[in-house]
């Protein structure tokens, strides 16, 4: 959904101006970028300072703002991301400065009594001058969780024909999980020309499986120059197999600075073996701090055999919190023999839900003899969606002497497919050791059908130990023909 999240100091200034307009300072606007003389927002008889630094502000900054306000005979407001010192708050009360804190979601909180008096104006205003002021007031109220009053502001603005208000109503209903009402308002806003409403309507339509209509609305918004719509249209087209047109829209969005589009364009180009052009777009996205693009650069270098560069890009991506990059970096480190650091990265990825990393931690734990820990990680991998780890649990439990539970996990693996026959091989050996040779032979035959040479050896041993040397010879020779290095030597032990 379209949001008012704060990403830059300018976003914070715009949010403060919007908030002050909602309080009745209808002409409040941000000052020009650059030296501002200590004022970020101005209006008629209003000056305000907005600070995004992660520190508490003290009295000197407030005194500077009060000096400007006194000269201009204006009200003064100070907005801080991280609050104010106790001394500053005490001084602000005597100096009649309204203090507000805010968060990255544009929620504004009055800090002192003067600020609370200002915000009380919201409840006393009967009429507002414009749809824009109504929307500003609605955004403020919604940020405080007062959705009923916010909705009333939006509806009044919508009744004036404002498409942005219709979009805001859609967003509010969406957040409340009232999807039918959200779609209705997005549709009204889209038909009135709101690009945000078009994109939000398309998002709901996609979730409902209405792909063609979603594509239509993305096209409408993209045609108006909406960069996010260009990117999302590229996603829809790419998913539908229309790669050439998807590339076109990704490129338009990428040239307008849309980072995800840069990365996705690189993916499509890489798939067409245009690796140099793909690398160029990956690098542009990576230079913007895009972790998936860094991961894709790492994979590109890995494919070229440049493990050092691959590790460098995987590490940069992993340090930004990209989970699969943590796993890939761990795998490279493991292959290079740095098991300690590999385990650290696997652990980070596993704690963020990566099943492959859990599997790798199980393997490393088993290698170091920590069988209980190994079984725990393998079981977590299964619960996270990695059914292949059922085989790993089975083999670990067998190694621990718990063949009963091992059998249960191995049968689950077999029922899930057992493509290479490994689960059937291990289960067949467990059954053979328990003397259940008929079932063991049946299970091992299934493993052989999947091309498992080890199962041929196990069958040879079962028949050799039962005295059926002819059948044993057949299986050992089959294993030898399939490249098993010890098949002939094992055959000789039964034939001598």
Image: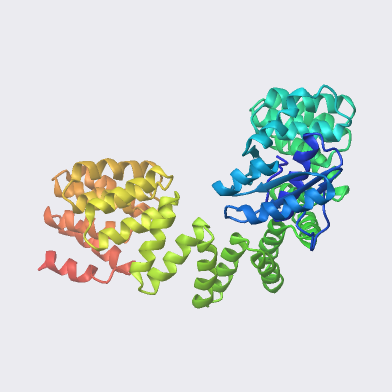
Nearest to the observer: residue 58 or residue 460: 58
Query: Which quarter of the picture shows residue 156?
Result: top right
Evaluate whether residue 397 shows in this view: yes
Tell me where residue 200 appears, x and y as whole percent.
Answer: 74, 38
Residue beneath the point at 66% across and 42% down: 94
Tell me where residue 416 appears, x and y as whole percent.
Answer: 40, 43
Tell me where residue 65 appears, x and y as whole percent.
Answer: 73, 52
Nearest to the observer: residue 437 or residue 419: 419
For residue 270, above or below residue 399:
below
For residue 153, above or below residue 458:
above
Task: Pick the quarter of the image with the C terminus.
Answer: bottom left
335 vs 189, left or right, is left
Residue beneath the point at 30% across and 45% down: 410
469 vs 12, left or right, is left
* The furthest residue to the left: 496
Tell me where residue 229 appears, x and y as whole percent.
Answer: 78, 47
For residue 344, above or below residue 205:
below
For residue 345, above or below residue 311:
above
Nearest to the observer: residue 19 or residue 38: 38
Residue beneath the point at 86% across and 32% down: 131
Residue beneath the point at 79% across and 41% down: 196
């Amino acid at each position: 959904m379209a949001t008012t999240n704060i990403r830059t100091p300018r976003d914070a200034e715009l949010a403060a101006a919007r908030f002050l307009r909602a309080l009745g300072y209808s002409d409040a606007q941000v000052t020009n970028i650059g030296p501002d003389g200590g004022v970020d927002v101005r209006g008629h008889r209003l000056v305000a300072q907005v600070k995004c630094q992660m520190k508490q502000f003290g009295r000197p900054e407030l005194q500077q703002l009060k000096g400007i306000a006194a000269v201009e005979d204006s009200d003064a407001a100070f907005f801080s991301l991280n609050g104010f010192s106790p001394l500053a708050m005490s001084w602000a009360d005597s100096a009649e400065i309204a203090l507000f804190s805010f968060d990255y979601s544009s929620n504004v909180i009055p800090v002192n009594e003067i600020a609370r008096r200002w915000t009380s104006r919201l409840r006393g205003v009967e009429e507002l001058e414009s749809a824009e002021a109504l929307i500003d007031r609605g955004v403020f109220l919604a940020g405080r969780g007062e959705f009923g009053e916010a909705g009333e502001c939006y509806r009044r603005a919508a009744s004036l024909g404002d498409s942005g208000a219709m979009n805001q109503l859609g967003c509010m209903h969406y957040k409340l999980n009232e999807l039918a009402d959200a779609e209705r308002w997005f549709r009204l806003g889209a038909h009135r020309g709101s690009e945000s409403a078009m994109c939000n309507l398309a998002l709901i339509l996609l979730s409902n499986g209405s792909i063609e209509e979603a594509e239509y609305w993305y096209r409408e918004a993209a045609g108006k120059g909406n960069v996010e719509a260009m990117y999302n249209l590229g996603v829809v087209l790419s998913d539908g197999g229309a790669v050439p047109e998807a590339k076109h829209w990704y490129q338009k969005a990428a040239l307008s600075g849309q980072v995800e589009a840069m990365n996705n364009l690189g993916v499509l180009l890489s798939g067409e073996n245009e690796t140099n052009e793909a690398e160029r777009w990956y690098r542009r996205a990576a230079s913007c701090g895009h972790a998936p693009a860094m991961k894709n650069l790492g994979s590109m270098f890995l494919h070229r055999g440049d493990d050092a560069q691959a590790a460098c890009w995987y590490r940069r991506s992993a340090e930004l919190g990209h989970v699969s990059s943590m796993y890939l970096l761990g795998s490279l480190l493991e292959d290079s023999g740095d098991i300690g650091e590999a385990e650290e990265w696997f652990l980070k990825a596993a704690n963020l839900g990566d099943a492959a990393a859990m599997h790798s931690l199980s393997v490393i734990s088993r290698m170091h003899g920590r069988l209980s820990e190994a079984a725990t990680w393998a079981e977590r991998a299964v619960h996270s969606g990695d059914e292949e780890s059922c085989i790993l649990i089975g083999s670990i439990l067998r190694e621990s002497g718990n063949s009963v539970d091992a059998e249960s996990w191995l049968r689950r693996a077999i029922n899930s497919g057992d493509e290479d026959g490994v689960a059937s091989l291990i289960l067949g050996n467990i059954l053979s050791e328990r003397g259940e040779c008929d079932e063991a032979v049946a299970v091992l035959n299934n493993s052989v059908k999947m091309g498992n040479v080890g199962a041929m050896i196990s069958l040879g041993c079962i028949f050799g130990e039962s005295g059926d040397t002819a059948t044993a010879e057949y299986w050992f020779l089959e294993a030898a023909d399939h490249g098993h290095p010890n098949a002939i030597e094992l055959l000789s032990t039964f034939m001598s």
